[in-house]
Amino acid sequence: MKVKRINPSLTSSYDFNLPQELIANHPVSPADTAKLLIYNRSTNTITHEIFKNIINYLPQNTSIFLNDTKVIKARIFGKKDTGGKVELLLNKHLPNNDTYLVYIKGKVHVGTKLYFEQDLEAEVVELVEDDGSRVVKFTQNNNHIPFQVLIEILNDIGHIPLPVYINREDEKCDETDYQTLFAKNYGAVAAPTASLHFTEELLDELKDKFETNYLTLHVGAGTFKPVDVEDITKHNMHSEYYDIPQKTQEALNNNSTKKLAVGTTATRTLEYYTRTKKVSGECDLFLNPDNQPQIVDILLTNFHLPKSTLIMLVASFVGLEKTLELYEEAIKNEYRFYSYGDAMLII
């Protein structure tokens, strides 16, 4: 892996070459047989392990934080009022009203109506120029439908919204593979993928030994968006709804434990709460080498896209040069990358 300039403020510095064959199109089975790269910052050492042995590397006084968001079957196919085919990706339920932010393949204008199975209709009410998204209202048989009813319809007619780098259509197995064991609250269009490595047995083992806490951050499509400005400080970070229950707040306020965030989404939620003390709302925190973590001590994460906010978050823990070194080590050892790929633990 070679970059021309190593400057943590430049997006181009977070680029790297990844062999196509290292992009995982399916997860390994069992999930906890994935590879685990462990980087110990205090000793500056790298260890190659199997994920199921992660418990042997965590400090005794570790408190674990997991994101219990649940992925929606957010990808649906239908027709426009002109008869043309259309594909819609639900991104997020907008707060305090009955509208939704979506992405639509094909040209639409305000007032365009889209028709789907089960008499589901969507009317375009706003065009968002910044990112090409659209605001729509959903109805069924001309009647307003609440969010939970929409979820039930999507569970029947929708598809799991696999990331574009998984070069295949979704399959029945993705309904479980692309959902965490503890997924509870519908609202995400992408899974918190660091959590996909747990099996029931491993999760029970961790719960027996460590305090385990849950929070919710509904992962949006913006998580995959590359940073498209060269100066990362000029990047307009997407926002995602989050909620932190009382028990998790208490665990966060316990200064005697090490905090392990499982995934970038849990990390951003904990760090946003630490900075704002807001227990719910919209999180738009952008962690990078110039905005380092304040409360998360240990990070568990997958290997991420070049020039993404996710690899920049990793660099907020270990710096840009070390991040590129760890990614080079992973490529050399044929780790599998992205959502269904292997994992890295930074302690």
Image (cartoon, helix red, strand yellow):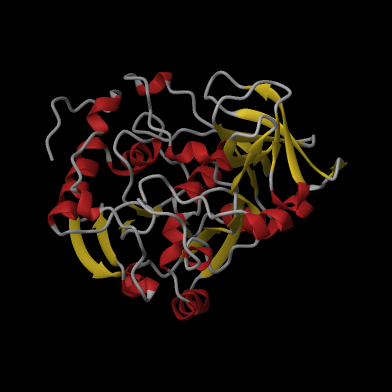
The count of marks equals: 0
For the question of whether residue 231 can be seen, the reply is yes
Q: Is 197 situated left or right of 279 in this image?
A: left
- Left or right: residue 42 versus residue 328 is right
Q: Residue furthest front?
A: 83
Q: Residue at x 69, y 45 (%)?
A: 116
In the image, 268 versus 331, the foreground residue is 331
Quadrant in the rendering for residue 232? top left
Q: Position of residue 7 (x, y in %)?
A: 23, 25
Name the residue at 31% across, 60% down.
Answer: 342
Q: Is residue 231 above or below residue 197?
A: above
> Residue 290's spot in the image, x, y percent?
37, 28
Residue drawn at (43%, 35%) of the image:
287
- At x 35%, y 46%, the residue is 165
Residue 332: % across, % down: 12, 54
Dividing the picture into quarters, in which one does residue 283 lie? top right
- Residue 233 pos. (x, y %): 40, 21
Is residue 76 found left or right of 329 in the rendered image? right
Does residue 185 show up?
no
| Image quarter (top left, top right, bottom left or bottom right) of the N terminus | top left
Left or right for 52, reference 320: right
Above or below residue 280? Residue 209 is: below
Classify the position of the C terminus by image quarter.
bottom left
